[in-house]
Image: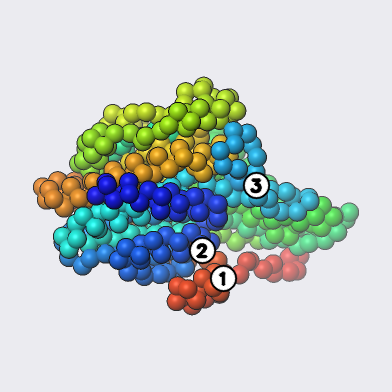
Amino acid sequence: MTDWIGANAAALTGLADRIWAWAEPSLREWRSAAATAELLRAHGFTIAWGTAGLPAAFVATHGDRGPVLGFNVEYDALPGLSQRAGVPRHEPVAYEGDAYAPAYGPGHGCGHNALAAASAGAAIAAARTLGNRATIKVFASTGEEQLVGKAYAVRDGAYDGLDAFLDWHPSPVTGTGWGGTSALYSATFSFLGSPGHGSNPLGTRSGLDGALLLADMIERLRAGNVAPSGRVSYTISGGGAPNVTPDLRTVWVYVRESSHAAAATLYDKVVTCAHAAAAASGTRLEHRLVTAIRQGLGNQAGARLLHHTMSELGPPAFTDADHAFAQRLQTAIGRPAAGLATEVLPLRPPAEPDLGGPSSDTSEVSWAAPHLSLVAAVVPLGVPLHSWAATAATGTSIAHAGLLAAARYLASAAVTLVEQPGTLAAVREEFEAAERPPAPLPADAEPPYHLPPPEFLDATGQSPRPSRTPPVSAEPLGKI
Protein backbone atom coordinates (compact mmCIF):
# COMPACT_ATOMS: atom_id res chain seq x y z
CA MET A 1 0.00 0.00 0.00
CA THR A 2 2.58 2.59 1.05
CA ASP A 3 4.85 1.04 -1.59
CA TRP A 4 2.34 2.12 -4.24
CA ILE A 5 2.54 5.72 -2.99
CA GLY A 6 6.32 5.64 -3.23
CA ALA A 7 6.28 4.08 -6.69
CA ASN A 8 3.80 6.71 -7.90
CA ALA A 9 5.33 9.69 -6.10
CA ALA A 10 6.07 11.47 -9.38
CA ALA A 11 2.43 11.32 -10.45
CA LEU A 12 1.22 12.66 -7.10
CA THR A 13 3.78 15.45 -6.77
CA GLY A 14 3.26 16.30 -10.44
CA LEU A 15 -0.46 16.78 -9.81
CA ALA A 16 0.34 19.00 -6.82
CA ASP A 17 2.71 21.11 -8.89
CA ARG A 18 0.18 21.59 -11.70
CA ILE A 19 -2.52 22.66 -9.25
CA TRP A 20 -0.01 25.02 -7.63
CA ALA A 21 0.83 26.61 -11.00
CA TRP A 22 -2.82 27.02 -12.00
CA ALA A 23 -3.64 28.68 -8.64
CA GLU A 24 -7.36 28.69 -9.30
CA PRO A 25 -9.50 30.66 -6.81
CA SER A 26 -12.45 29.31 -4.85
CA LEU A 27 -15.39 27.94 -6.87
CA ARG A 28 -13.42 28.26 -10.13
CA GLU A 29 -10.97 25.34 -9.86
CA TRP A 30 -11.76 24.02 -13.34
CA ARG A 31 -8.38 22.58 -14.39
CA SER A 32 -7.50 21.43 -10.87
CA ALA A 33 -10.77 19.51 -10.56
CA ALA A 34 -10.44 17.94 -13.99
CA ALA A 35 -6.84 16.81 -13.40
CA THR A 36 -7.68 15.29 -10.00
CA ALA A 37 -10.69 13.47 -11.44
CA GLU A 38 -8.62 12.13 -14.31
CA LEU A 39 -6.06 10.62 -11.94
CA LEU A 40 -8.81 8.89 -9.96
CA ARG A 41 -10.60 7.69 -13.09
CA ALA A 42 -7.37 6.17 -14.35
CA HIS A 43 -7.33 3.98 -11.23
CA GLY A 44 -10.86 2.66 -11.48
CA PHE A 45 -12.93 5.35 -9.77
CA THR A 46 -16.22 6.51 -11.24
CA ILE A 47 -16.86 10.27 -11.19
CA ALA A 48 -20.13 12.07 -10.41
CA TRP A 49 -19.83 15.81 -11.09
CA GLY A 50 -21.66 18.80 -9.65
CA THR A 51 -22.01 18.00 -5.93
CA ALA A 52 -24.63 20.33 -4.38
CA GLY A 53 -24.94 22.11 -7.73
CA LEU A 54 -21.31 23.31 -7.65
CA PRO A 55 -19.63 22.51 -10.99
CA ALA A 56 -16.04 22.11 -9.73
CA ALA A 57 -17.04 19.57 -7.06
CA PHE A 58 -17.33 15.82 -7.61
CA VAL A 59 -17.59 12.49 -5.81
CA ALA A 60 -15.34 9.66 -7.00
CA THR A 61 -16.28 6.11 -5.98
CA HIS A 62 -14.43 2.79 -5.98
CA GLY A 63 -16.27 -0.36 -4.89
CA ASP A 64 -19.80 -0.98 -3.65
CA ARG A 65 -19.57 -3.09 -0.48
CA GLY A 66 -18.08 -3.15 3.00
CA PRO A 67 -17.43 -0.09 5.17
CA VAL A 68 -17.75 3.23 3.34
CA LEU A 69 -14.68 5.42 3.83
CA GLY A 70 -14.43 8.98 2.55
CA PHE A 71 -11.36 11.05 1.67
CA ASN A 72 -11.24 14.84 1.45
CA VAL A 73 -9.88 16.74 -1.58
CA GLU A 74 -9.61 20.53 -1.84
CA TYR A 75 -7.81 22.51 -4.52
CA ASP A 76 -8.63 26.22 -4.27
CA ALA A 77 -6.01 28.97 -4.00
CA LEU A 78 -6.20 32.24 -2.05
CA PRO A 79 -6.46 35.76 -3.50
CA GLY A 80 -3.41 38.00 -3.37
CA LEU A 81 -0.83 35.30 -2.56
CA SER A 82 0.89 34.86 -5.91
CA GLN A 83 4.57 34.04 -5.40
CA ARG A 84 7.40 32.35 -7.26
CA ALA A 85 8.11 28.85 -5.95
CA GLY A 86 11.31 28.34 -4.01
CA VAL A 87 12.17 32.05 -3.81
CA PRO A 88 12.77 33.37 -0.26
CA ARG A 89 11.63 36.93 -0.98
CA HIS A 90 8.32 38.42 -2.01
CA GLU A 91 8.19 37.93 -5.79
CA PRO A 92 4.61 37.67 -7.16
CA VAL A 93 4.16 36.21 -10.62
CA ALA A 94 0.53 37.20 -11.30
CA TYR A 95 -1.30 40.50 -10.96
CA GLU A 96 -4.91 41.62 -11.10
CA GLY A 97 -6.72 44.95 -11.17
CA ASP A 98 -5.80 48.13 -13.03
CA ALA A 99 -3.38 51.03 -12.70
CA TYR A 100 -5.45 52.58 -9.89
CA ALA A 101 -6.14 49.38 -7.97
CA PRO A 102 -3.30 46.89 -8.51
CA ALA A 103 -3.47 43.57 -6.69
CA TYR A 104 -1.51 40.35 -6.65
CA GLY A 105 -3.01 37.27 -8.23
CA PRO A 106 -3.98 34.10 -6.33
CA GLY A 107 -1.55 31.61 -4.87
CA HIS A 108 -1.52 28.39 -2.86
CA GLY A 109 -0.74 29.89 0.53
CA CYS A 110 -2.74 27.17 2.28
CA GLY A 111 -1.26 24.18 0.47
CA HIS A 112 -4.45 22.83 -1.08
CA ASN A 113 -2.41 21.71 -4.07
CA ALA A 114 -0.66 19.27 -1.74
CA LEU A 115 -3.89 18.38 0.01
CA ALA A 116 -5.57 17.33 -3.24
CA ALA A 117 -2.69 15.17 -4.44
CA ALA A 118 -2.13 13.42 -1.10
CA SER A 119 -5.78 12.60 -0.50
CA ALA A 120 -6.28 11.32 -4.03
CA GLY A 121 -3.17 9.18 -3.72
CA ALA A 122 -4.25 7.83 -0.33
CA ALA A 123 -7.67 6.89 -1.70
CA ILE A 124 -6.14 5.06 -4.67
CA ALA A 125 -3.67 3.20 -2.44
CA ALA A 126 -6.42 2.20 0.00
CA ALA A 127 -8.71 1.03 -2.81
CA ARG A 128 -5.94 -1.09 -4.34
CA THR A 129 -5.19 -2.71 -0.99
CA LEU A 130 -8.76 -3.28 0.18
CA GLY A 131 -10.30 -4.35 -3.12
CA ASN A 132 -13.92 -5.41 -2.59
CA ARG A 133 -13.65 -5.23 1.22
CA ALA A 134 -14.58 -1.54 1.31
CA THR A 135 -16.19 1.27 -0.64
CA ILE A 136 -13.83 4.22 -1.10
CA LYS A 137 -15.26 7.66 -1.86
CA VAL A 138 -13.30 10.81 -2.66
CA PHE A 139 -15.16 14.04 -2.01
CA ALA A 140 -13.53 16.72 -4.14
CA SER A 141 -14.82 19.95 -2.68
CA THR A 142 -14.81 23.41 -4.22
CA GLY A 143 -14.47 26.72 -2.40
CA GLU A 144 -13.12 25.55 0.96
CA GLU A 145 -11.38 28.90 1.48
CA GLN A 146 -14.85 30.47 1.32
CA LEU A 147 -16.29 27.66 3.49
CA VAL A 148 -18.95 26.99 0.89
CA GLY A 149 -18.61 23.61 -0.82
CA LYS A 150 -18.98 21.15 2.04
CA ALA A 151 -21.56 23.21 3.92
CA TYR A 152 -24.00 22.92 1.02
CA ALA A 153 -22.99 19.34 0.22
CA VAL A 154 -23.66 18.20 3.80
CA ARG A 155 -26.99 20.02 3.82
CA ASP A 156 -27.94 18.24 0.60
CA GLY A 157 -26.95 14.79 1.92
CA ALA A 158 -23.81 14.14 -0.14
CA TYR A 159 -21.91 12.74 2.86
CA ASP A 160 -24.72 10.55 4.19
CA GLY A 161 -23.84 6.87 4.71
CA LEU A 162 -20.13 7.28 5.48
CA ASP A 163 -18.59 5.11 8.18
CA ALA A 164 -15.58 7.43 8.52
CA PHE A 165 -14.12 10.49 6.81
CA LEU A 166 -10.31 10.74 6.54
CA ASP A 167 -8.80 14.17 6.17
CA TRP A 168 -5.58 16.12 6.51
CA HIS A 169 -4.37 19.68 6.16
CA PRO A 170 -1.01 21.23 5.31
CA SER A 171 0.80 22.81 8.26
CA PRO A 172 4.23 23.77 9.60
CA VAL A 173 4.09 20.69 11.89
CA THR A 174 3.11 17.01 11.73
CA GLY A 175 0.65 15.60 14.24
CA THR A 176 -2.96 14.98 15.19
CA GLY A 177 -5.47 15.46 17.99
CA TRP A 178 -9.18 15.64 18.58
CA GLY A 179 -9.74 19.36 19.06
CA GLY A 180 -12.32 21.12 16.91
CA THR A 181 -12.34 24.17 14.66
CA SER A 182 -14.40 27.32 15.14
CA ALA A 183 -17.96 27.83 13.95
CA LEU A 184 -18.39 30.52 11.31
CA TYR A 185 -20.94 32.72 9.58
CA SER A 186 -20.08 34.31 6.24
CA ALA A 187 -22.32 37.07 4.91
CA THR A 188 -22.30 40.03 2.55
CA PHE A 189 -23.83 43.40 3.33
CA SER A 190 -24.42 45.54 0.23
CA PHE A 191 -25.22 49.23 0.66
CA LEU A 192 -27.11 50.75 -2.27
CA GLY A 193 -27.26 54.51 -2.71
CA SER A 194 -27.66 56.98 -5.56
CA PRO A 195 -24.71 58.12 -7.70
CA GLY A 196 -23.70 61.61 -8.67
CA HIS A 197 -20.74 63.85 -9.46
CA GLY A 198 -18.02 63.75 -6.88
CA SER A 199 -17.70 67.55 -6.94
CA ASN A 200 -21.31 68.02 -5.84
CA PRO A 201 -22.22 65.23 -3.43
CA LEU A 202 -25.30 66.92 -1.95
CA GLY A 203 -28.42 64.94 -2.78
CA THR A 204 -26.53 61.72 -3.42
CA ARG A 205 -26.22 58.76 -1.09
CA SER A 206 -22.95 56.90 -0.86
CA GLY A 207 -22.80 53.15 -0.57
CA LEU A 208 -19.22 53.62 0.61
CA ASP A 209 -20.50 55.62 3.59
CA GLY A 210 -22.67 52.68 4.61
CA ALA A 211 -19.76 50.25 4.21
CA LEU A 212 -17.38 52.40 6.23
CA LEU A 213 -19.93 52.92 8.99
CA LEU A 214 -20.39 49.16 9.26
CA ALA A 215 -16.63 48.63 9.32
CA ASP A 216 -16.28 51.21 12.10
CA MET A 217 -19.05 49.59 14.15
CA ILE A 218 -17.38 46.18 13.78
CA GLU A 219 -14.20 47.72 15.19
CA ARG A 220 -16.23 49.11 18.11
CA LEU A 221 -17.74 45.68 18.72
CA ARG A 222 -14.30 44.31 19.51
CA ALA A 223 -14.00 46.48 22.62
CA GLY A 224 -16.72 44.84 24.70
CA ASN A 225 -18.78 42.45 22.63
CA VAL A 226 -16.30 39.87 21.31
CA ALA A 227 -15.00 37.11 23.59
CA PRO A 228 -11.38 35.91 23.34
CA SER A 229 -12.65 32.97 21.25
CA GLY A 230 -14.47 35.28 18.81
CA ARG A 231 -13.25 36.81 15.56
CA VAL A 232 -14.85 39.28 13.15
CA SER A 233 -12.96 39.96 9.92
CA TYR A 234 -14.12 41.74 6.79
CA THR A 235 -13.21 43.21 3.43
CA ILE A 236 -14.82 45.99 1.36
CA SER A 237 -15.29 45.69 -2.40
CA GLY A 238 -16.60 47.98 -5.09
CA GLY A 239 -13.95 49.84 -7.05
CA GLY A 240 -15.04 53.00 -8.88
CA ALA A 241 -13.54 56.45 -9.21
CA PRO A 242 -13.27 59.44 -6.83
CA ASN A 243 -15.38 61.69 -9.08
CA VAL A 244 -18.42 59.38 -8.95
CA THR A 245 -20.35 58.98 -5.73
CA PRO A 246 -20.15 55.24 -5.08
CA ASP A 247 -23.70 53.90 -5.19
CA LEU A 248 -22.88 50.26 -4.37
CA ARG A 249 -20.35 48.92 -1.89
CA THR A 250 -20.29 45.51 -0.25
CA VAL A 251 -18.78 44.43 3.05
CA TRP A 252 -17.99 40.70 3.21
CA VAL A 253 -17.83 39.54 6.82
CA TYR A 254 -16.61 36.37 8.56
CA VAL A 255 -17.83 35.85 12.12
CA ARG A 256 -16.13 33.04 14.11
CA GLU A 257 -16.73 31.63 17.55
CA SER A 258 -15.94 28.46 19.45
CA SER A 259 -19.53 27.18 19.19
CA HIS A 260 -22.39 27.54 16.78
CA ALA A 261 -24.56 29.23 19.43
CA ALA A 262 -21.89 31.82 20.27
CA ALA A 263 -21.23 32.49 16.58
CA ALA A 264 -24.95 33.05 15.95
CA THR A 265 -25.12 35.57 18.81
CA LEU A 266 -22.13 37.53 17.52
CA TYR A 267 -23.41 37.36 13.95
CA ASP A 268 -26.75 38.85 15.01
CA LYS A 269 -24.86 41.82 16.48
CA VAL A 270 -23.11 42.40 13.15
CA VAL A 271 -26.46 42.27 11.33
CA THR A 272 -27.86 44.88 13.74
CA CYS A 273 -24.84 47.10 13.04
CA ALA A 274 -25.39 46.74 9.28
CA HIS A 275 -28.99 47.94 9.56
CA ALA A 276 -27.83 50.89 11.66
CA ALA A 277 -25.15 51.74 9.07
CA ALA A 278 -27.74 51.73 6.30
CA ALA A 279 -30.06 53.97 8.28
CA ALA A 280 -27.28 56.42 9.13
CA SER A 281 -26.03 56.61 5.54
CA GLY A 282 -29.48 56.77 3.95
CA THR A 283 -28.74 53.71 1.85
CA ARG A 284 -30.64 50.50 1.26
CA LEU A 285 -29.18 47.33 2.73
CA GLU A 286 -29.14 43.98 0.95
CA HIS A 287 -27.96 41.25 3.29
CA ARG A 288 -27.06 37.76 2.11
CA LEU A 289 -25.98 34.81 4.25
CA VAL A 290 -23.33 33.11 2.10
CA THR A 291 -22.57 30.13 4.32
CA ALA A 292 -22.70 28.97 7.92
CA ILE A 293 -20.90 26.10 9.63
CA ARG A 294 -20.84 24.56 13.07
CA GLN A 295 -17.73 24.01 15.16
CA GLY A 296 -15.80 20.87 14.30
CA LEU A 297 -16.50 17.62 16.14
CA GLY A 298 -13.30 15.84 17.12
CA ASN A 299 -12.92 12.08 17.49
CA GLN A 300 -10.49 10.83 20.13
CA ALA A 301 -10.57 7.19 19.01
CA GLY A 302 -9.78 8.25 15.45
CA ALA A 303 -7.01 10.57 16.59
CA ARG A 304 -5.38 7.76 18.56
CA LEU A 305 -5.43 5.54 15.47
CA LEU A 306 -3.90 8.29 13.35
CA HIS A 307 -1.22 9.09 15.92
CA HIS A 308 -0.19 5.44 16.16
CA THR A 309 -0.04 5.21 12.36
CA MET A 310 1.97 8.41 12.03
CA SER A 311 4.40 7.38 14.74
CA GLU A 312 4.97 4.03 13.02
CA LEU A 313 5.57 5.58 9.59
CA GLY A 314 7.59 8.57 10.82
CA PRO A 315 7.67 12.26 9.84
CA PRO A 316 8.10 13.62 6.30
CA ALA A 317 11.54 12.95 4.83
CA PHE A 318 13.08 16.38 4.22
CA THR A 319 16.48 16.87 2.63
CA ASP A 320 19.34 19.15 3.66
CA ALA A 321 18.42 21.41 0.75
CA ASP A 322 14.84 21.62 2.06
CA HIS A 323 16.11 22.72 5.48
CA ALA A 324 18.45 25.29 3.93
CA PHE A 325 15.65 26.87 1.90
CA ALA A 326 13.37 26.81 4.94
CA GLN A 327 15.92 28.79 6.95
CA ARG A 328 16.34 31.39 4.19
CA LEU A 329 12.57 31.81 4.00
CA GLN A 330 12.24 32.12 7.78
CA THR A 331 14.96 34.78 7.85
CA ALA A 332 13.21 36.70 5.06
CA ILE A 333 10.00 37.07 7.11
CA GLY A 334 11.72 37.75 10.43
CA ARG A 335 11.20 34.34 12.04
CA PRO A 336 13.84 32.19 13.77
CA ALA A 337 15.79 30.06 11.28
CA ALA A 338 14.49 26.82 12.80
CA GLY A 339 14.16 24.87 9.56
CA LEU A 340 11.52 22.18 9.19
CA ALA A 341 9.61 20.03 11.66
CA THR A 342 11.38 16.68 11.97
CA GLU A 343 9.12 14.75 14.35
CA VAL A 344 5.56 13.63 14.85
CA LEU A 345 4.13 15.72 17.69
CA PRO A 346 2.54 14.09 20.75
CA LEU A 347 -1.19 13.47 20.57
CA ARG A 348 -3.00 16.76 21.24
CA PRO A 349 -6.21 17.00 23.31
CA PRO A 350 -8.61 19.94 22.80
CA ALA A 351 -7.28 23.29 24.01
CA GLU A 352 -8.56 24.50 27.38
CA PRO A 353 -9.78 27.17 27.40
CA ASP A 354 -10.84 27.38 23.76
CA LEU A 355 -9.49 30.71 22.52
CA GLY A 356 -10.75 30.26 18.98
CA GLY A 357 -8.86 29.68 15.79
CA PRO A 358 -9.29 28.64 12.16
CA SER A 359 -12.47 27.38 10.56
CA SER A 360 -13.12 24.92 7.75
CA ASP A 361 -16.25 23.73 6.03
CA THR A 362 -14.90 20.24 6.79
CA SER A 363 -16.36 20.78 10.26
CA GLU A 364 -19.82 20.32 8.75
CA VAL A 365 -18.76 16.86 7.55
CA SER A 366 -17.73 16.03 11.12
CA TRP A 367 -21.43 16.10 12.06
CA ALA A 368 -22.32 13.75 9.19
CA ALA A 369 -19.58 11.12 9.75
CA PRO A 370 -16.68 10.47 12.15
CA HIS A 371 -13.90 12.89 11.17
CA LEU A 372 -10.31 11.62 11.41
CA SER A 373 -7.97 14.51 10.75
CA LEU A 374 -4.23 15.16 10.87
CA VAL A 375 -1.75 17.82 9.81
CA ALA A 376 1.55 17.30 7.99
CA ALA A 377 4.40 19.73 7.47
CA VAL A 378 4.52 21.34 4.02
CA VAL A 379 5.88 24.75 5.10
CA PRO A 380 8.73 25.67 7.46
CA LEU A 381 8.24 26.22 11.17
CA GLY A 382 6.93 29.71 11.92
CA VAL A 383 5.76 30.35 8.35
CA PRO A 384 2.08 31.29 8.58
CA LEU A 385 -0.40 29.75 6.19
CA HIS A 386 -2.29 32.30 4.08
CA SER A 387 0.95 34.16 3.35
CA TRP A 388 3.20 34.59 0.31
CA ALA A 389 5.93 32.74 2.20
CA ALA A 390 3.68 29.69 2.45
CA THR A 391 3.05 29.88 -1.31
CA ALA A 392 6.81 29.92 -1.88
CA ALA A 393 7.12 26.64 0.04
CA THR A 394 4.05 24.76 -1.22
CA GLY A 395 5.47 24.74 -4.74
CA THR A 396 8.71 22.99 -3.68
CA SER A 397 10.03 19.61 -2.62
CA ILE A 398 9.13 20.53 0.98
CA ALA A 399 5.47 20.15 0.04
CA HIS A 400 6.26 16.98 -1.89
CA ALA A 401 7.70 15.31 1.21
CA GLY A 402 4.78 16.43 3.35
CA LEU A 403 2.09 15.27 0.94
CA LEU A 404 3.67 11.86 0.41
CA ALA A 405 3.82 11.35 4.18
CA ALA A 406 0.18 12.43 4.54
CA ALA A 407 -0.88 10.03 1.79
CA ARG A 408 0.81 7.15 3.62
CA TYR A 409 -0.79 8.10 6.95
CA LEU A 410 -4.31 8.28 5.51
CA ALA A 411 -4.09 5.14 3.40
CA SER A 412 -2.69 3.10 6.28
CA ALA A 413 -5.36 4.34 8.68
CA ALA A 414 -8.10 3.50 6.18
CA VAL A 415 -6.85 -0.07 5.84
CA THR A 416 -6.67 -0.43 9.62
CA LEU A 417 -10.30 0.69 9.97
CA VAL A 418 -11.38 -2.13 7.67
CA GLU A 419 -9.03 -4.81 9.00
CA GLN A 420 -9.77 -3.98 12.65
CA PRO A 421 -13.59 -3.70 12.90
CA GLY A 422 -13.31 -2.98 16.62
CA THR A 423 -11.38 0.21 15.91
CA LEU A 424 -13.99 1.40 13.43
CA ALA A 425 -16.73 0.51 15.92
CA ALA A 426 -15.04 2.64 18.62
CA VAL A 427 -14.73 5.56 16.20
CA ARG A 428 -18.40 5.33 15.29
CA GLU A 429 -19.58 4.85 18.87
CA GLU A 430 -17.88 8.08 19.93
CA PHE A 431 -19.34 9.93 16.94
CA GLU A 432 -22.88 8.73 17.56
CA ALA A 433 -22.76 9.67 21.25
CA ALA A 434 -22.18 13.37 20.52
CA GLU A 435 -24.99 15.88 21.04
CA ARG A 436 -25.63 17.64 17.74
CA PRO A 437 -26.30 21.37 17.38
CA PRO A 438 -28.85 22.35 14.73
CA ALA A 439 -27.57 22.74 11.18
CA PRO A 440 -27.09 26.50 10.64
CA LEU A 441 -27.47 26.70 6.86
CA PRO A 442 -31.08 27.43 5.80
CA ALA A 443 -32.72 25.03 3.37
CA ASP A 444 -33.34 27.83 0.86
CA ALA A 445 -29.80 29.27 0.93
CA GLU A 446 -28.05 29.21 -2.45
CA PRO A 447 -24.28 28.92 -2.84
CA PRO A 448 -22.26 31.44 -4.86
CA TYR A 449 -21.94 30.32 -8.47
CA HIS A 450 -19.40 30.98 -11.22
CA LEU A 451 -20.23 29.96 -14.77
CA PRO A 452 -17.66 27.38 -15.91
CA PRO A 453 -15.92 27.71 -19.29
CA PRO A 454 -17.65 25.78 -22.08
CA GLU A 455 -14.82 23.28 -22.41
CA PHE A 456 -15.16 22.31 -18.73
CA LEU A 457 -18.91 21.83 -19.07
CA ASP A 458 -18.38 19.69 -22.16
CA ALA A 459 -15.68 17.56 -20.55
CA THR A 460 -17.71 16.94 -17.39
CA GLY A 461 -21.15 16.60 -18.99
CA GLN A 462 -22.68 19.43 -16.97
CA SER A 463 -25.14 22.13 -17.98
CA PRO A 464 -24.71 25.81 -17.16
CA ARG A 465 -27.08 27.74 -14.98
CA PRO A 466 -27.33 31.53 -14.61
CA SER A 467 -25.21 33.13 -11.93
CA ARG A 468 -26.86 35.26 -9.26
CA THR A 469 -27.18 38.88 -10.37
CA PRO A 470 -25.86 41.67 -8.13
CA PRO A 471 -28.28 43.94 -6.25
CA VAL A 472 -29.79 46.77 -8.28
CA SER A 473 -30.38 50.26 -6.94
CA ALA A 474 -34.01 51.34 -6.64
CA GLU A 475 -33.80 55.03 -7.50
CA PRO A 476 -34.94 57.61 -6.72
CA LEU A 477 -34.16 57.27 -3.04
CA GLY A 478 -35.44 60.72 -2.14
CA LYS A 479 -33.72 63.56 -0.37
CA ILE A 480 -31.32 63.25 2.49
Instruction: Please name the residue shown 50% across and 54% down the image.
Output: 19
Outermost residue to the left = 422
Q: Is residue 416 above or below residue 356?
A: below
Disc 2 to disc 1, how far (Cα)? 8 Å
Please give the name of the residue rendered at 25% of the width and 33% of the height, measured from the top-left corner. Answer: 311
Name the residue: 64% across, 55% down: 250
Say which residue label 2 marks: 30
Q: In the image, what residue occupies the spot 37% across and 34% down?
A: 317
| Residue placed furthest toward the front | 7
The residue type indicated by label 1 comes to: Pro
Label number found at residue 453 = 1
Disc assigned to residue 93: 3
Q: Residues within 10 Å of mark 1 (few under 14, many from 20)?
A: few
Indicate the amino acid at tag 3: Val
- The residue under label 2 is which amino acid type? Trp
Q: Check disc 3 and report its element: helix, strand or loop.
A: loop
The label nearer to you, 1 versus 3, is: 3
Provide residue 52's location: percent of width, then percent of height: 40, 67
